[in-house]
Image (cartoon, grey):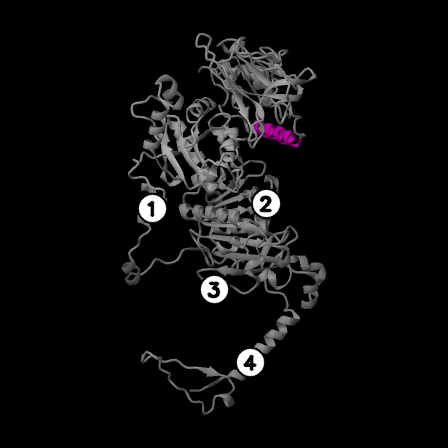
Amino acid sequence: MVFDPLWEVAGRYVRLQRGTKEARGLCPFHAEKNPSFYVYRIDQGAAHQRFVCFGCGARGDVIDFLCRIEHRETKDVIREIRDQVGLSRAPSREALERIARRRQEADALPPPPALYEFAEEVPAGVPDLWNPAGGKTAPIFAPKNDPREPGGKPWRMELPVDRVHEYRGWRGELLGYVVRTPAKPSTGRKKSTPQVGWARNIKLADGSVNEGWCFGSFPVPRAVFGASAVSAARDEGRPPRYLIVEGEKNQEDAARVLSGDDDRTVVSWVGGGQAWAKTDWAIIAEGDVALWPDNDPEGDATMAALGAHLWSLGCRSLSWIRPAAGRGKKWDVSDALTAEKWSPDRLRAFIADTAYPWSPALAVSVGTAEGTTPAVVAQISSDQAIADRRLSNAERATFGATRKNALLMFESVPPEPDDTLPGLRRKSVGSIIGAGGVGKSYAALQTALSIAVGCDLWGLFGPAMSPLKQGRVLYVNGEDDEEEIWRRAYAMKADLVRRYGDVQWEALVPYIEQNLVVHCTVGTDLTLAELNTLQRLAMVQQGALFPALMEVAEGTRLIILDTTSKVAPELDEADSVHMTAFMRYLDRLARKTEAAVIFVHHMNKSSQSGKGAQGQGAASGSHKITNNARWQLNMWGMSEEDALDRGEDPETAWSWVGTKRVKANYVRGSAALWWRRTDCGLLEGSEPPPPTTQERTAAEKRSTLLQHAVSPAHVTGAKVSTLKPSGGSKAGFTSMRGGVFSE
């Protein structure tokens, strides 16, 4: 066995940002928000690697690290290495729990103070950043550096310059610079493009506060690179026609050539490929936009994502420029103008001849070695491309698969419906709606256990121990921690032993072990759906929980998500767009896994008392929650006033929970049923409480009407007539008015 060096061992516990000779991350031994934990790579041998935390003082080699993180003695760690047994490649559960506690403590810490404040624009009279005659920039503050650390870099640095790009705002004001440094292969130095602005309150690690040129990141949302040219074109009344290229160098080179009144205004964005999402494109989306990506898959993916964003902003005049034939990887407009010496007329002709109409529908996903690169542009020739939405092959195949044999449906016997709960079919979505504190989570967990063992253990949906279709259940709780779920499960076991005895419980154990899977997502970032905040739009996208469930839900009969606000915390329940997208994800989850999906959700305040609790509109938030569910069970508590009206003791009103299946698209809804709640919160089916005064009055009226309707005095001598429809059909029907049949 070759024992892993410290970089690899520490990397199992800490997310390390690795450099050439050092790596850093958040310390696993204390709570912090700014990385102060360093692993130094003095040479390739594991024996010479050391770690140090400048926050808590922890330091040592790989053995010290393992002893400290795993709470083991030195001799035990050395013995395992010596005997070539090796420590487990996976961190121990105890170590991960300690790290999780440190992360929770770190989350409670106040946010770290900003290291600098960029001026809204570079003040007049400040020293120049770069003197072309000197070859290097003026000294630039680097507040993240600390020369006092081993291998630390200086607080102020002078950069070698290949090119300096001015970054100006919409009014032409100077916001800062993007400095392009040259590569130096002999030393392994790569080219870089750091952002530099004039900053105040620059806080260095020695405690000093300074003002001057500073490395950093320009505030978000940013103006496009070339914003002043856009404003000038608008002021001159030129048509809003834009060319978007990738990179500051491409923008400047193309803008120098395309300067005529009929030319497109050239723009780009500041930062790397994905930094387009930090830029405000609203003004650009109002015009006719041509997209020119770099000639590689990454450039295609980046520009396609930006094009989709412009489309979402309302831009419907988009075109795509393919690179000239035979050009190498990363070929771009600067290569055409500088290396190949294209003339302005040739560039204009190339753009006019190769640009074809484009929309997000013309983008497809193409697999790569690293995974899937989203939205890589399809190779479609200009004579095939159209501005309207165009089906991809996958979409065409999907639509073709939706066609069914209509005649077969009329003439053959359909399969029997597969109900997981009464009225809740597999591959459909249902909900449990209830006020706070009525026992929604207990109802969800008891339902999960009942399906796992194949019978209604507590009589929640029918007689106790009546059969239910047995199957695998995934119960996902994002609201309660592991200990609370544990207490509920133990209370359920104790109640079942009391009801049916130890022998019956032991008979249930194999089914529970085989069919019931419980996940507690409290304290994690796992969500079913989340907002794409980078694009500053109300765009709902899949969270990590969705593919996670897809991976483990094969063969599952029921998935329960408890609760909506925890599995999709970023979504606004009152926003119909958010909730429509959320329900579509639930429906997709149900269809793809062939499981029934139940989500637990809160009841709105106006429905928590009175008849409103028994209506479909009781769910809190958008009506899309109810409209897009196929099944809905409402839960409400008994008020003290209701208890008095029923002749019940108000002190025990809390133990009554009213339920009603208010929606079941495939069967009739049910009448209101009542459950009793035990001292620990467990729910059980029960005989209903005495009726209210209103219910008694309504029952008496119904009884009187029924007696009146069947009285012989009202039907003696009645004439029954068959009425023919206007179409001449022989089929007849009768009409009844006032309880007497007449023509």
Label 3 secondary element: loop
How far apart marks 2 and 1 lie (CA) works out to 47 Å
Q: Pointer 4: what residue?
A: 705
Numbered mark located on residue 490 in the image: 2
Label 4 – label 1 distance at C-alpha: 56 Å
> Going from the N terminus, do you reach mark 2 or mark 1 first?
1
Frontmost residue, 688 versus 276: 276
Residues marked 1 and 3 touching at CB (< 8 Å): no
- Pick whichever of labels 4 and 1 is earlier in the sequence: 1
**Which residue extends farthest bottom?**
717
Q: Earlier in the sequence, mark 2 or mark 3?
A: 2
Residues in magenta?
95-108
Mark 2: secondary structure: helix
N-terminal of the pair, mark 4 or mark 2, is 2
Q: Rate crowding at label 1 as few (under 14), some (14 to 19) or many (20 or more) other CA atoms within 10 Å.
A: few
Q: Secondary structure at mark 1?
A: helix
Q: Nearer the viewer, mark 2 or mark 1?
A: 1
Question: What label does residue 688 carry, if any?
Answer: none
Is residue 654 rendered magenta in the image? no
Residue at image position (69%, 68%) is: 645
User: Which of the pair 140/20 is nearer the observer?
Assistant: 140
Where is residue 589 shown, x and y percent of the image? Answer: 44, 46
